[in-house]
Image: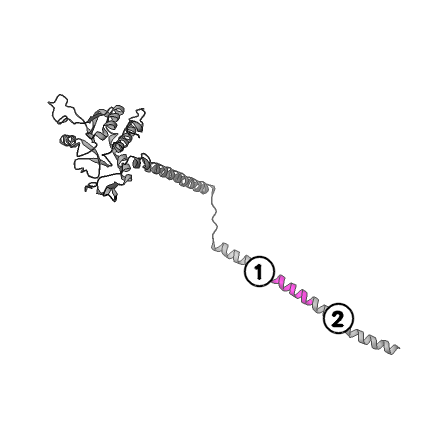
Amino acid sequence: MLKEKNEKVMEIIPEKIGETIEKSIKKIKEKTEKFIEESVKKITKKEKKRKTDEIKKDIPIKKISKKELLEKAKKLAEKIEGRVETEEIKEKLEASRKTLVPIEDYIKVGAHIGTKVITPHMRKYVYRRRNDGIAILDINFTDEKLKELIKLVEKFEPENFILVCKREAGWKAVEKFSELTGVRVFTKKYPAGILTNITLPNFFETDMILVCDPWIDRNAMRDGKKIKKKIFALCDTNNYAFDADFFVPCNNKSSKSLGLILYIIAREYLKSKKIKKEVKLEDFVETE
C-alpha cells in the first residue's frame, strides 16, 4: 500500500512542478512586457521634452513691454482707420460713377441715335452702326461728357452765358431752361453781330456760349470765336467741333433727346447755384 502511494505522489509532483513553472514563466513574461512598455513610454516622453527644449532654444522668446504693446496697438488702429478711409473713398468713387439719369432714360429718348454720317471728331464716340447705316453713340460717353460740361457751365453766372438753339425741336426745352435758370436764350434766329458790333442797340457781352448744333448755330459760334469766349456744344455724329472748346456727343436732332439733355443741365446748374426750384422732366420732354 505504501509503495502504491509513493508511486502516485511521484507521479503528481512533476505535474505540479510543471504547472508552477508555467505560471512563473507567464508572470515573468507579463512583468517583462509591462516593464518594456513603461520604459518605451518614458523614453518617448523624454524624447519629446528634449525636442521641445531644442525648439525653444532655436526660437528666442522676446519679452514685450507695455509701452511696445501700446505702440503696436496704435499702429494697428491707424491701419484700421486707413482702411475705413479707403472704403469711404471707394464709396465716393462709386457714387461719382453713377449716371446722371438711368441709362434707360437716355435710351428711351433716343439720345444715342446718331446719323448715317460720322465725322472724324465723333468717330471715337460711336459704338456701332445699325443695319440701316445709322450710327449708334456710346451712351456712357454721353453721360461722362455731360458731367464734365455741367462742371464747366457751373462756373458761369446766368447773366454771363447764353444758350442758342435754332432747331425747332429744341425750342420748348430751351425756353423752359431760360425760365428756370434766368439764362438768355436765342431760338428761331440768332441776330448776327449782337456780340461783336458795339453799335447795335441790342449789343451785349457774354463769357460763354452753349449751342445745340454747331452747324445750325454756327453764326453764334463764329461770334464767340471772334471775341474769344468759351464755346460749348451738343454734337451729333455728323457734326464738326472745330470751334468748340468742349462738346457732348448726343442726338441733337430729337426734341426728346434735347429735352432730356437740357433738363439734366438745368437741374444740376440750379443745384450748384443753390437755387431751389422744381425741375420736372415732363416740362422739357414731350410725353405721349
Q: Identify the mark at residue 220; answer none if there is no mark.
A: none
Residue drawn at x 24%, y 30% as measured from the top left = 153
Q: Nearer the viewer, mark 2 or mark 1?
A: 2
| Quarter-of-image position of residue 280 | top left
- Way the structure is coloured: one colour
| Quarter-of-image position of residue 183 | top left
Q: Which residue is mark 2?
A: 19
Closest to the observer: 255 or 19? Answer: 255
Q: Position of residue 81 (x, y in %)?
A: 40, 38
In the displayed structure image, the side of residue 221 where residue 63 appears, left or right: right
Q: Position of residue 277 (x, y in %)?
A: 31, 24
Please tell me whether residue 60 is drawn above or below residue 110 in the rendered image: below
| Quarter-of-image position of residue 200 | top left
- Residue 39 forms part of the magenta stretch: yes
Dominant secondary structure (helix, strand or loop) of the stretch shown in magenta: helix
In the displayed structure image, the side of residue 145 where residue 21 appears, left or right: right
Dot placed on the residue nearer the N-terminal end, 2 or 1: 2
Please rate how many residues cluster around mark 1, counting C-alpha atoms within 10 Å: few if below 14, some from 14 to 19, many from 20: few
